[in-house]
Amino acid sequence: MRSTDTASMLPADQTRTPADMAVSANTILHALREAIVTTLAAIATLACAVAIAPGPGPAVLAVVLCLSLSRSQLDRDLRGRVEAAIALPIVGVVAVGVGRLLHHAPWLGASAFVAGMFLSIWLRRFGPMARRAGSLIALPFVVLLTTPHIRAAPESAIPAPLIPVLIALLALLWVGLLHALARRVRLLAPVLVAEGRPLSTPAHASSLRPMASTRMAIQMAVALSVSFAVGYAFFAERWAWIVLTAFIVNSGNRGRLDVAYKSVLRVLGAAAGTLIALTFALHAGSHDGTTVGLILAAVFLGVWLRPLGYAWWALFATLALALLQGFAGSSATGILWPRLEEIVIGATIGVVSAWLVLPVRSTTVLRRRIADALATISDAVDPATPARMPADVAAAIASVEQMAPAYRASRQVTRGFRNPQPADWIDALVACRDSAIALIEQGEAPGPVRRAVAAARKSMREPGEILQALQDLRRSLAG
């Protein structure tokens, strides 16, 4: 074990150990397995979609739904699968109706779209079940922005409005089936459950007024409204990419810094994806077999490399969607540069909305999550706690670690100009994870550890004391 005193004197980004590197390797390996399962689900659903309704629209829908369902993890337990199977057809029918309005009555469709997305985020305030319902509501609406208008084939016995619903159920079936099979054969880790429920971040009463979920819903509604207005006014045939980008950078909003960080990565990744797609368009030709293979390869690489940085996902998602558009008959060289312009406009709208409309400070979100994680550790090391769940501690710290990329990038830019650095708080807390879990698994924690946890919780009121308190906790746990 390394000397904790020496480690505590180093900058947080220089304290990586072999254990940290092993965690990174495990993350990449897990992402590789996820990518394999997701790609197989996409292939299976794509084959079914082409058999049911030949054409580019159902093919695009099949791939996008598989990616979204795999990412949202709505299928990870029996309850989630049942809820999705019941709700997806209902929400899908509504989304199809909104899609028709967008096609035939654009402004009315835009209003319905904004209302649906506002509702999906606002519902988060009512707990985990409402959060899952919001995810189900949002999924088909987002898919509308990436899927060409679906028309029934003349020989098809399935009405066009029912095709998206059927494909959604097929995507849920294949994603759920292959994920369950992968967990059964231990290709994927089993779903962690604490006290009979899937792990989630700790619930707490928001100190913001209006509360964070309401603020994010209003920010999203404003961003989408402005995006529709700009798109309809200046990009009549290509408005969807402005709206889609504004949605992407504001979704899962963890504060202003997070939105700005995702916007930069979205633009950079899309620019790289555009250059690669243009290269393929110039050299690969328009062979359907080659295009399908490249699309699936882009999907696989995007899912695999996403944990390493959002820019990788933006790059390969842009590439895949560009190739899908080419598969649908559009000219890649004619749409890619204008699309990059629309992505920049959508990202700008998203950032302005997050920073000016009821803004949420990222440090406020981070301190709340660190406080929740410390509360979870405190409960786990309390001798009065009847059942100690190390998995709860891991989940709470993982919730904090989700905010690390944006803050680590900010640390590189503001080093020497900003003190304290919130990224150091994250690194110090993450360094406590293995020791805390090992101690909880061994049994009762000694008094000095409990006192160090209590001191770290008190330090959350004073930003200047947080880092030192977390470093003291790390030394106490390691000792």
Image: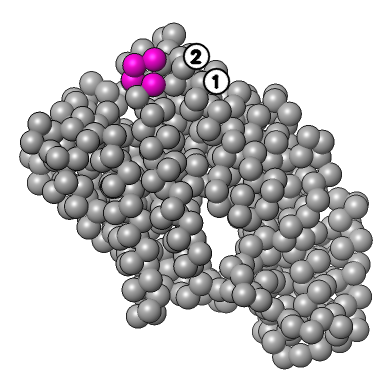
**Residue 191 sits above or below residue 363 on the image:** below
Position of residue 111 relative to residue 209, above or below, is above
Residue 5 in sight = no
Q: Nearer the viewer, residue 325 or 120?
A: 120
Q: Residue at x 43, y 43 (%)?
A: 90
| Residue 29: % across, % down | 41, 69
Residue at image position (52%, 47%) is 135
Categorize mark 1 by other alpha carbons within 10 Å: few (<14), some (14-19), many (20+).
many
| Callout 2: SS | helix
Mark 1 and mark 2: Cα distance apart in space = 6 Å
Q: Quadrant of the N terminus?
A: bottom right
Q: Disc 1 vs disc 2: Cβ atoms closer than 8 Å?
A: yes
Amino acid type indicated by mark 2: Ala
238 horizontally vs 445: left or right: left
The spot of residue 461 in percent (x, y) is: 90, 52
Decide: is 333 above or below 50: above
Q: Is residue 445 left or right of residue 86?
A: right
Pick whichever, 172 or 343, lies toward us. Answer: 172
User: x%, y% of residue 266?
Assistant: 46, 37
Q: In this picture, which residue range is highlighted in magenta?
A: 101-105
Q: What residue lies at 32% left-to-right and 44% top-to-bottom?
A: 165
For this orientation, the residue located farthest to the top is 233
**Label of residue 376 in the image:** none
Mark 2 highlights which residue?
229
Q: Tell me the residue at 80%/59% (across/down).
A: 371
Q: Which mark is residue 225?
A: 1
What is the magenta segment's predominant secondary structure? helix
Indicate whether residue 36 is drawn in magenta.
no
Judged from the image, the secondary structure of the residue bearing numbered disc 1 is helix
**Identity of the amino acid at label 1?**
Ser
Which image quadrant is residue 290 in? top left
Quarter of the picture containing the C terminus is: bottom right
